[in-house]
Image (cartoon, rainbow, N blue to C red):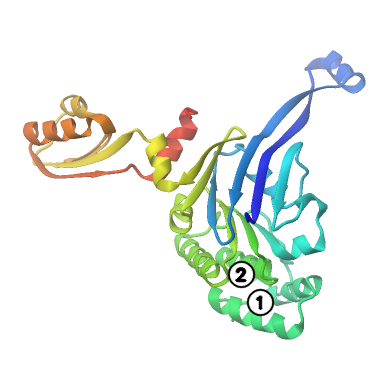
Amino acid sequence: MSIIAVENLSKTYPVAVKQPGLKGTLNHFFHRTYRQIKAVQDVTFYIEPGEVVGFLGANGAGKTTTLKMLTGLIHPSAGQVRVAGYNPFRRQPQFLQKTSLVMGQKQQLLWDLPALDSLKINAAVYQIPDKIFNQRLDKLSSMLSLQSKLTQPVRKLSLGERMKAELLAALLHHPQVLFLDEPTLGLDVNAQVSVREFLKEYNQQYQATILLTSHYMTDITTLCDRVLLIHQGLLIYDGSLDGLLERFSPCREVKVELAQPLSEETLKEYGEIESIEGQEVRFFVPRENLTETISRLLAQLPIRDLSVNDPPIEEVIGRLFSTGQV
């Protein structure tokens, strides 16, 4: 049975329309008109217990709106949602015990108090007995390397340490389902790696289900075997990362190292040039022309080395969002 079941989910916002000038202001005041903004349109997907799923989309695509509907923060305009067997919008205590939401741009810890004080408040809210609270605190703080930081005021923690403390607070009640919205936003490389390693270890130890949004593709490629891709409110892909490349990247990346520099005019005959750095050239070559193009390159150019790869996933997604071609 799916732990997250989303069927025909939609969210539409009415937005007031106002014309400029005094007349527009008076009309807006007495005869207000609205246009409908479709943030999410007829989205359906299912997630099984223990899965780690990436949720991708450009800014404004509908990712955060969907997460807010899954956690019950906003009510859908249409469709049905079941998370851990509950309707999220009812916000039942049993549902809140089984889920948690972490948003990289918002914090739940009290700024001027030590993180430990906020954690004790969370333990009281979730009615966690002292013995279990101490056991979980020791375990999670050890996994996050936070033992020596919990007694410091939150405002004195680094950004990476604050994010770890936020994760600890969100996981103290051992939720079955964890929603993460940009959990590594703004963190340096070392802090990002640390958070990823923790999430991977936590999922393996506790079989928690994780739905993750991130603009850092390394978060997705490190943690997720499956991705959901949303574009302008529509779910346009649900499957593996490899399948995503097959569907949205009709080209392969060919890298060559030349024995001597050649002009761009000469090189562009062999494919779309992505970059030229000295004697190293990257081409995008249509998959159906790959064998023929490699044969031509080897026969006609002074090549020292050649490799063929799928384009980096972040480039595929970036092109997709920038061109709007789905």
Judging depth in this view, the residue of 210 and 193 nearest the camera is 210
Q: Is residue 306 found left or right of 112 in the rendered image?
A: left
Give yes or no for contact between labels 2 and 1 (Cβ–Cβ under 8 Å): yes
Residue 13 location (% of width, % of height): 75, 33
Classify residue 209 by image quadrant.
Answer: bottom right
Q: Give the mark, 2 or 1, whose residue is nearer the N terminus.
A: 1
Near mark 1 (Cα within 10 A), the count class, few <14, some 14-19 or many ≥20, is: some
Amino acid tagged 2: Leu
- Gap in angstroms between the C-alphas marked 2 and 1: 7 Å
* Residue furthest out toward the right: 30
Element type where label 1 sits in the image:
loop
Depicted 185 relative to depicted 25: above or below: below
* Residue furthest out toward the front: 1
Q: Residue at x 16, y 30 (%)?
A: 292
Q: Residue at x 59, y 60 (%)?
A: 49
Mark seen at residue 152: 1
Residue 197 location (% of width, % of height): 48, 67
Q: Residue at x 63, y 60 (%)?
A: 178
Classify residue 309 by image quadrant.
Answer: top left
Classify residue 104 by image quadrant.
Answer: bottom right
Depicted 23 relative to depicted 134: above or below: above
Residue 299 location (% of width, % of height): 7, 33
Mark seen at residue 157: 2
